[in-house]
Amino acid sequence: MIEKSMKALEFNKILEMLSEYAISERAKQKLLELRPYLSERDVKAKIKDTTEGRKILDHIGSPPLAVMKDIEMLLELAEKGAMLIPEQLTQIGLFINACKRMKGFLKRAESLGVDIAGYGGSIHELSELSSEIDSTIRNNAIEDSASKELKDIRRKMEQIRTEMKTKLEATLRSKKEWFMEGYVATRNGHFVLPVKKEYKHMVSGSVLDISSSGSTYFIEPTAVAKLKEELSIQEITESNEERRILYVLSALVGENAFQVRLNKEAMETLDVIFAKAKLSLDMKAIPAIINTDRYIKLDNGRHPLIKPSECIPLNFELGNGTSGIVITGPNTGGKTVALKTVGLLQLMAQSGLHVPCEEAKLCMNNLVLCDIGDGQSITENLSTFSSHITNIINILTYADRESLILLDELGSGTDPAEGMGIAIAILEELMHKGCLFVATTHYPEVKEYANKTEGLVNAKMAFDRESLKPLYRLEIGEAGESCALYIAKRLGLPKHMLERAYQEAYCNDNEKTHKSIDRNFIENVMDEPGDIAAPPIVISHIEKHQEPKPVGIRSQRFHIGDSVVVYPQKKIGIVFRSADEKGEVGVQIQKKKEFVNHKRLQLKVAASEMYPEDYDFSIVFDSVANRKARHKMDKGYQPDLEITYEREQLK
């Protein structure tokens, strides 16, 4: 379940990117196997390493790291007494020289006051071994100067070759008509003369080759055969001396194997640290502040797998009394990206990586579990809904108060009524477990549940109603809408169809029979608030005695005198007027009357619990003039009398 969640959040892609910055194969493998640390001390220590590595990159530059391929295998061979060939000794020499350069690099880094510069003290210079290899091996071959004996042997060999060549060239010059060419050739390591076929019996020696046409015989003259035998003896002597030299060097490597391994471990550790630092540099990332207070806050966080030029920054906050956030909004509005961003940055920080944010405060989690994507499986015979429920059951099994849970399209893939019920049940269970969680949904009932449940907060993905495009910007504190009716209107869906759709979506059975239901909604469906100044609300004598306009059942839960919490400011107010046809409720906040969409309200204390049944609320809400006017209306018809409230936007 844990690995499945990390894959769904695409943490594996981050690790693949990270491993590309490493030089050595072992460091690459370690980075691919990187997982979130569960100890706060470990997380902070690893983040500190990344921060210091980034500081070194910024001020000094890239470190002289080494590939280190096959170093461990070569050390094991040397320890067992095997002879390393020149190419292998060259590898050892290059690695030791890289360690020397790294030691000097870290010495310069000490001026930055970074603790990882201390790794330089654990790197052994191995000057003797390095000097022996450098003076003995060059261009993957043993130098003549490797020993006095080898130098003498090779000098003798060169003299023999010169003597052989001189004799052959003299023969060529004296009997030019015998030969096809005027130069000495070689065949299988032997000096030969290119003799014409008709003169092959004129040259005493061994035929080593014949041309494809048969016209030329390559003959090694008897005069140089003895010299060749002598050269062969010297070659054997040379080989023995070379083997002796290589065995000595290999033994020296074996003697220093322990120190070489320590260097290798230090270089691999530094390779890992600087790979993290390079990723931080390329992402323009920062170190997150880690806490154990179950608090998450991201300022302008970016999804690391989306190009910065295309990524809309995410501002997010969870904790401090809020256990969960329910995100709503139109399809393709960025809900899933927001969900993944929160989870992915949390995994990155807890793995010791920097995160692409302007500021990040992230908490310790024992698990980051998610249900994202439809997960439909033909082989396992799982529908979308079955897959969601299977994942969520597993998540609920593992989750506790130290976990972060991310659920996408909660309750989707089945009957809407039952899906809504299951979604609310899941949220209640997560609240009971005390974990932090974020869920996305389209169900209005889930928004309402979040609105009235302490510890839950609604959020929405912003939508540009002019261009009909999502803005991919998360706004916490207010529930979003699918914007389907608005989009349908903008695209030309007839008004009578919009009315019918609205009735089916938002009205109860009794309201659906009302022919003129909320025509104002259809005329001005989802118009941007604030474009036209809202007129005063007028309650005339006639209106007082008319049948009230139908109001959606969800907005009817607020009654005059109820104490409510107004989001996102979380201010306390008292309802002075029940919801109008647009679902706006009159709320008095600190003696100021305002009209607030019912979706932004949460019931704190019902009026029935605070006031007597026949309590006159005009004492609380009305001005003296309005109270006098109301009393006159109660006595009889007053044609010119009206009660006026000024409508104000809640900011």
Image (tube, helix red, strand yellow):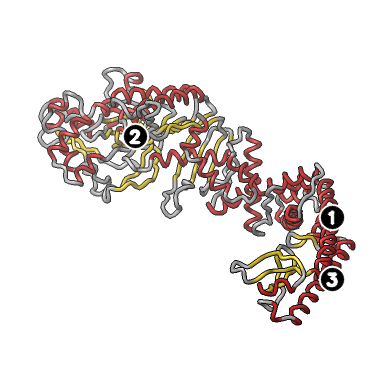
| Residue 388 in sight in this render | no
Q: Quadrant of residue 32?
A: top right
| Residue at 81% from the left image edge and 61% from the top image edge | 232
Q: What is the CA distance from the residue labelled 1 to the residue labelled 2?
A: 91 Å
Name the amino acid, label 1.
Answer: Asn
Labelled disc at residue 159:
3
Which mark identifies residue 649?
none
Tell me if residue 233 comes above or below residue 607 in the rendering. Answer: below
Mark 2, other Cα within 10 Å: few <14 / some 14–19 / many ≥20? many
Q: Which callout, 2 or 3, points to the residue nearer the camera?
A: 3
- Pick the front one: 243 or 600: 243
Could you tell me the amino acid type at mark 2? Arg
- Foreground pick, 223 / 160: 223
Q: Secondary structure at mark 2?
A: helix
Separation of marks 2 and 3 at Cα, in angstroms: 100 Å
Percent from the top left, x then y, of residue 300?
47, 48
Q: Label 3 is placed on what type of residue?
A: Gln
